[in-house]
Each structure stands twice: as structure tokens, then as C-alpha cells.
Image (cartoon, helix red, strand yellow):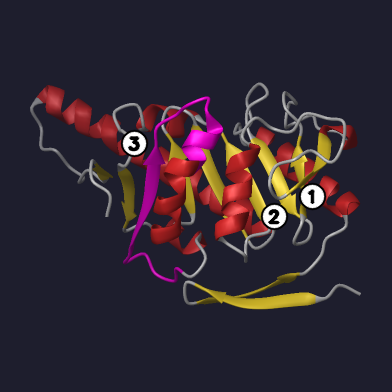
Amino acid sequence: MCRFGFAIFAGIAYKWPMAIAFEHAVQDIIKAGNRLDRLQLAPATSGNYSIRLNDQEMAITVSGAHKGQLDGDQVMLADLSGRPLEDKKPSAETLLHCLIYELYPHVNAILHTHSVASTVLTRSLHDGDVIALSDYEMLKAYPGVNTHDVCVDLPVFENTQDIAEMSARAKPVLSGQKPPAFVIRCHGIYGWGVDMDEAARVIEATEMLLSCEMNIKQIQNSQNQSGGKNEPSDHLSGHAA
């Protein structure tokens, strides 16, 4: 029988399985990859997914695998400091998973996706900026949000191939803001949850919201070029909240 743990984090009560079998985690990761690939959120070999198994280990996708075509050999065991526990190479961004698990003890699943919206929308942004999302019904997909009448800030981090440096840069921001997701400039989105279902809901909602923001920018640009009014308002911010 599965035991459950309970905690309150950022004012929200969470209940989650205290330990997950590696084999079950592998199947959940494969299913997530299949779904995200159908949603066009896993092009080429992009993205990485993981599940926390216990207080020492995680299951994580190997480097270079197509996430829509995963098999059991392409999910591996690593410890929560990122050290491989198998003779396989984990995702190049494993340290970001380690950081999220370290900061958020209620989180047990992490998804990282690449999309047109997250890439295009952030080209004009910089490290330390935020994407402010407000007035959307879809915001209720985020844990603890029960109304559209709220603003959720997603931090933006500059892309780099030095993941240790990015993790160090992201740690104080994620510790203070406690967002449901973050965006890497010209790269993609990280979202997480108490389990894989919640992580997938956060990712899908965030991708939809960023698509809305991208369409808003396109409308604004078209109106500006034609001399029309600049409506609706711009939610992209050059300053962290």
C-alpha cells in the first residue's frame, strides 16, 4: 500500500505518495512524453522530464532521446544531486531538476518543454524579467489559484549551456517568488507539480497562456503598424515583481 505525505507550502496543503517505484515512474514519464509530443511540445530531442522517487533518487530522461518515442531504457536513475546511478548519461539540464526538488519539497514531477510561443515571446526579454499573466481563466490551472482576477509572474532566465551557473542564478529568484513555472529565454519552460498529472497541467496551461501573450503582441504590432490603438495591454515586463 502506498503511504502518503502531507505538507503546507506557500499556504497550500499538499498530499503525495512518499515513495514511487522506478518502474511506475518510467511509465508515467513515457506517457507524458507521448502526450506532449502530440501537443507539439517535444520537437526533435528537446525537453527533459523527471519524477522524484524518494528523498534520495529520481527517474529522469537520458540525454538525446526523442521524448515522443521514449522506451524504458531512455529513463534512468540518478540521485537528487544529479549523480547518475546507472551507466547512462542524464539530461544536460539535470541540475535544474535538482534545484527544483531542493527548493520545493512538495514537488515530485518536473517537465521541461520547448515551443514556438516560449521561444519567440522571450526573444525581446532579458535575465531578471518576468512575464506577468493576469485576467485569464486558465490561471486556475495553477496550484492555489482559484480566480482569474490574479497576476502570476513567471521569471525569465537568460539561456546558457552552463547549467550550474544558471542554477545558481535561478536559486534566489525561485526561493523568493515560488512561481508555478519559469521560462528560459529563447529556450523553453520548466513546470512542476506534486505529481505528473499536476506538472502536465501546469505545463499545458503555461504553454497556452504564452501562446495567448504571443498573439497579443502580434495584434499590438499589427495595430501599431496600421496606426490603430495599442490594445490589449502588454503583460511583458522588464522588471521583476
Label 3 sits on a secondary structure element that is loop
Image x and y of residue 65, in percent: 75, 26
Image x and y of residue 95, in percent: 61, 41
Image x and y of residue 198, in percent: 63, 59
Amino acid type of the residue tagged 1 in the rendering: Asp
The N terminus is located in which quarter? bottom right
Q: Hey, which quadrant is residue 170 in on the image?
A: top left
Q: Hey, which quadrant is residue 217 in on the image?
A: top left
Q: Is residue 5 left or right of residue 25?
A: left
Label 2 sits on a secondary structure element that is helix
Q: Is residue 9 left or right of residue 157?
A: right
Image x and y of residue 226, in percent: 12, 24
Q: Is residue 153 magenta?
A: yes
Q: Which residue is mark 3?
A: 127
Tell me what residue is drawn at x 33 percent, y 45 percent. Answer: 131
Tag 3–tag 1 contact (CB < 8 Å): no
In this view, 199 is above or below 36: below
Q: Which mark is residue 28?
A: 1
Q: Which mark is residue 196?
A: 2
Tell me what residue is drawn at x 34 percent, y 41 percent. Answer: 213
Q: Label 2 neighbourhood size at 10 Å, few (<14), some (14-19), many (20+)?
A: many
Mark whose residue sits in front, 3 or 2: 3
